[in-house]
Image (cartoon, rainbow, N blue to C red):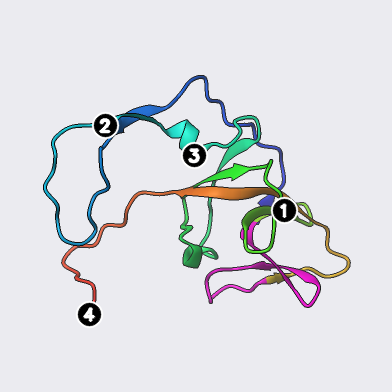
Amino acid sequence: MMQASQPEPLALDGPLILPFAPEAVACGFPSPAEGYWSGDLDLSRHLVRDKVSTFIWRASGHSMTGAGIHDGDLLIVDRGITPVPGHIVIAIVDSEYTVKRLDVIHGRVVLLAENPDYQDAVLHELSEMSVWGVVTWILHPPGIRRGVRPRR
């Protein structure tokens, strides 16, 4: 966990526009490429629900690898979404930030780690916890695997 301080909102002065391919790319057998673009895509419209309540955090550590969050990943976090059990959240626990999956088990709030090497955080009566925001997107580069084929 890291010490709580207030980050700044995401500063989007304008749209973030990239060329958009006309069709989905096959993850199975290749399909013929058409060789043209269908237009532009504004990433901010797809990644940001509300720019005033959206922030970017950098993940640190390995407790959420099972949820696809790795050390150094960028997390897009929306403070305007009401958190519900099952959401991945940025929580403040006893004045420290952490990213975990929110759950309620037997009437108690639990912050679930998504790596079996890490303990879940079961909040006790004397603990102070608030949800700072809900993680809406996880951004990271693809992993590099050389000379390794998936097992069949």
Image quarter of residue 33: top left
Q: Amino acid at mark 4?
A: Arg
Q: Nearer the viewer, mark 1 or mark 2?
A: 2
Residue contact between numbered discs 4 and 1, judged by CB atoms under 8 Å: no
Q: Nearer the viewer, mark 1 or mark 3?
A: 3
Question: In terms of depth relative to the viewer, which is nearer, 99 or 102?
Answer: 102
Which mark is first along the chain, 3 or 2? 2
Residue contact between numbered discs 2 and 3, judged by CB atoms under 8 Å: no
- Residue 95 in the image: x percent, y percent? 77, 52
- Residue 61 in the image: x percent, y percent? 53, 59
Residue contact between numbered discs 4 and 2, judged by CB atoms under 8 Å: no
Q: Amino acid at mark 3?
A: Leu
Residue with the mark numbered 3: 47
Q: Nearer the viewer, mark 2 or mark 3?
A: 2
Give the Cα separation between the discs numbered 3 and 4.
35 Å
- Work out which quarter of the rendered image holds the N terminus and state it: bottom right
Residue with the mark numbered 2: 38
Q: Is residue 141 above or below residue 38?
A: below
Find the magenta span and give its range.
Answer: 99-120
- Numbered badge on residue 152: 4
Q: Nearer the viewer, mark 4 or mark 2?
A: 2
The residue lying at 65 percent from left, 56 percent from top is 98
The residue lying at 61 percent from left, 36 percent from top is 54
Residue with the mark numbered 1: 96
Q: Amino acid at mark 1?
A: Glu
Give the Cα separation between the discs numbered 2 and 3.
19 Å
Q: Determine the residue located farthest toward the top in the rendered image.
A: 13
Which mark is first along the chain, 4 or 3? 3
Using residue 140 as the reference point, say whether residue 8 is left or right of it: right
Question: In terms of depth relative to the viewer, which is nearer, 102 or 118?
Answer: 102
Which mark is first along the chain, 2 or 4? 2
